[in-house]
Image (cartoon, grey):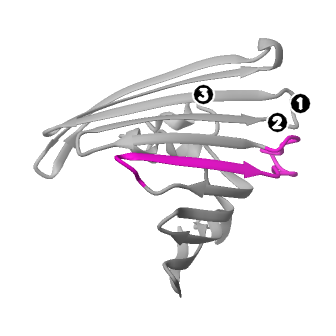
Amino acid sequence: RLGFKGEEDLGGGLKGLYMFEMTIDVDNGGFGSARDTFVGLGSNFGTLRIGQYNTAYKGVSIPTEIFGDTIADFTANGFSGETRQANNIGYTSPTFGGFKLGLEYSTGTETGADATQTNPMNAAVTWSNNAFYVAAGYYDYSPAVTNILETAMKVSAMATLGGFKIAATYEDQSGDGNTVVTDTANLAGMFTMGNHQFA
């Protein structure tokens, strides 16, 4: 991965944000697909971003991915919305009492395997403190390959107690007329001892 990001103080408590990140395809000697790529504005009232980036819905379960980008990453096993939404505009609120809200809308992706015919939208709310994390999200879209409006709802939670960490995520996906119904769940735990982690 290769990327550039930064921010610029615009005065009055307002700052400009930017990020451009891509994959490096070593096997084929070139650059791969774009990752988070956006511009935005941030202030004490929250952050507004426009571009392609991880959605608030995807972010619901990111803190609970104990195995991260490994072959055991649960997000590769049937969970919906685990992509970066293109042509996206989104707002993320500041944190109030541990709560944070994310709301996003897109014109959709017109080509490729993720092509959509509707205007995807998603929303998420999270709460966290030093020991606990709880989040919920909603996502709807219509893949061009099926032309069926699909919705997904996800809840995720994690507890950190000393060296122990336990995390759980559940998602319900459904389609028009209940033609597509998928329930996916994941439970994981980890124990940290010194420089070693057992999961």
Q: Height in image: 40 above or below 182?
A: below
Visible in this render: residue 136?
A: yes
| Residue at mark 2 to residue at mark 1: CA–CA distance | 6 Å
Of callouts 3 and 2, which one flags the residue occurring earlier in the amino acid sequence? 2
Q: Main secondary structure of the magenta part?
A: loop
Residue at screen point 55% across, 41% down:
124
Identity of the residue drawn at 34% across and 29% down: 188
Q: Amino acid at mark 3?
A: Met
The stretch drawn in magenta includes residue 104: yes
Spot occupied by residue 8 in the image (x, y as percentages of width and height): 52, 85
Q: Residues within 10 Å of mark 1 (few under 14, many from 20)?
A: some
Q: Which mark is residue 52?
A: none
In the rendered image, residue 15 lying in the magenta stretch gets the answer: no
* Circles 2, 1 touching at the beta carbon (< 8 Å): yes
Side of 25 where 130 appears, left or right: left
Front-lying residue, 149 or 26: 149
Range drawn in magenta: 95-119
In the picture of the structure, the residue carrying the numbered disc 2 is 143
Disc 1: which residue: 147
Q: SS of the residue at dot 1?
A: loop
Task: List x then y, in percent, for residue 29.
Answer: 64, 71
| 112 left or right of 82 in image | right
Determine which residue is flagged by label 3: 153
Measured in 3D between alpha carbons, the distance from the residue under mark 1 to the one under mark 3, in whole angstroms, is 19 Å
Question: Residue 37's quadrant in the figure?
Answer: bottom right
User: For the residue carrying disc 3, how many other residues have a C-alpha within 10 Å: few (<14), some (14-19), or many (20+)?
Assistant: many
Name the kind of residue labelled 1 in the image.
Answer: Asn
Residue 17 shown left or right of residue 121 in the figure: left
